[in-house]
């Protein structure tokens, strides 16, 4: 862990993987407002995809060798198939364990997928598979799954999820529309993640957060 100090207080080093994405960039900015030493692990050739403000305030590394040294928390915001969600993240976790990292936050950022049956949602299956294998691989590393419900942002809730079709004036209704669901924006999810990354005390394995708890009728 970092031994640097500012005003007599330790400065924590946070390693963020996946900062070139939308949510990853917001997590990076949320962490920087906390005065951390932010280290970004990016793929070779992807540096140009970083926001200029994030790149200027961070240490950027393109090689995993040494990237985990002195790190307090590893935050993953990578996306992809099982080769990324399971295999790549397990490699990150193993490297974190070897380096003595305190906490690992995988790239879940979702509803509570632990309650789904196998095969009900392939994307969730991969995340549960990572969670199962992480329990065996983590050693002393605290693995914290940030579960924020559904993203409330227009491009998600009003976009690829298909809940609303604004052009047609149509909406998809689950059940009678009276059950409450958790909703959080990208920005609020990033802020919650930054708090989890920096927490001094232990956190639960399943870290539930929500910006709003709404019924279908309340969402519209």
Image: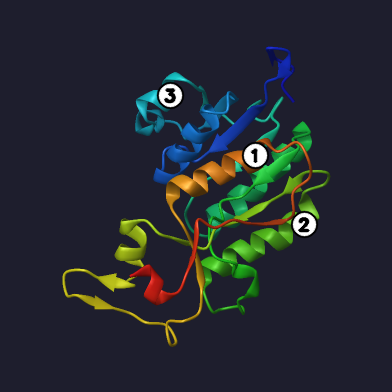
| Dot label at residue 55 | 3
The residue that mark 2 highlights is: 135
- Single out the residue that lies furthest toward the front: 218
Q: Mark 1 points at which residue?
A: 197
Q: Is residue 102 visible?
A: yes
Viewer-side label of 1, 2: 1
Q: Is mark 2 on a helix, strand or loop?
A: helix
Instruction: Look at 62% across and 40% down and name the residue there.
Output: 195
Q: Residue at x 54, y 58 (%)?
A: 210
Residue at the far top: name it: 7
The residue lying furthest to the right in this view is 140
Secondary element at tag 3: helix
The label nearer to you, 2 versus 3, is 3
Dot 1 falls on a residue whose secondary structure is helix
> Is 134 on the left-hand or right-hand side of 16?
right
Q: Can residue 78 be seen in this view?
A: no
Label 1, label 3: how many angstroms apart (C-alpha)? 20 Å
Residue found 41% across the figure and 43% down from its top: 21
**Crowd class of label 1 (few under 14; some 14 to 19; many from 20; radius 10 Å):** many
Q: Where is residue 166 in the image (x, y as percent from the top left)?
A: 21, 68
Q: Position of residue 193 (x, y in %)?
A: 58, 44
């Amino acid at each position: 862990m970092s031994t640097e100090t500012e005003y007599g207080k330790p400065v924590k080093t946070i390693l963020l993987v996946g900062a070139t994405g939308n949510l990853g960039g917001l997590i990076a900015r949320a962490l920087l407002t906390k005065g951390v030493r932010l280290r970004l692990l990016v793929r070779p050739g992807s540096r140009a995809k970083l926001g200029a403000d994030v790149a200027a305030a961070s240490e950027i590394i393109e090689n995993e060798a040494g990237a985990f040294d002195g790190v307090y928390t590893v935050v993953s915001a990578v996306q992809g198939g099982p080769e990324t969600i399971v295999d790549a993240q397990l490699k990150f976790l193993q490297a974190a364990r070897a380096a003595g990292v305190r906490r690992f936050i995988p790239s879940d950022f979702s509803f509570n997928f632990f309650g789904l049956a196998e095969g009900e949602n392939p994307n969730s299956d991969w995340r549960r598979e990572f969670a199962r294998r992480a329990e065996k691989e983590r050693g002393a590393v605290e693995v914290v799954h940030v579960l924020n419900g559904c993203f409330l942002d227009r491009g998600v809730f009003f976009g690829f999820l298909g809940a609303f079709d604004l052009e047609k004036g149509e909406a998809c209704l689950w059940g009678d529309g009276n059950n409450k669901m958790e909703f959080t924006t990208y920005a609020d999810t990033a802020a919650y993640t930054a708090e989890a990354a920096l927490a001094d005390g232990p956190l639960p394995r399943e870290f539930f957060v929500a910006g709003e708890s709404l019924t279908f009728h309340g969402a519209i």
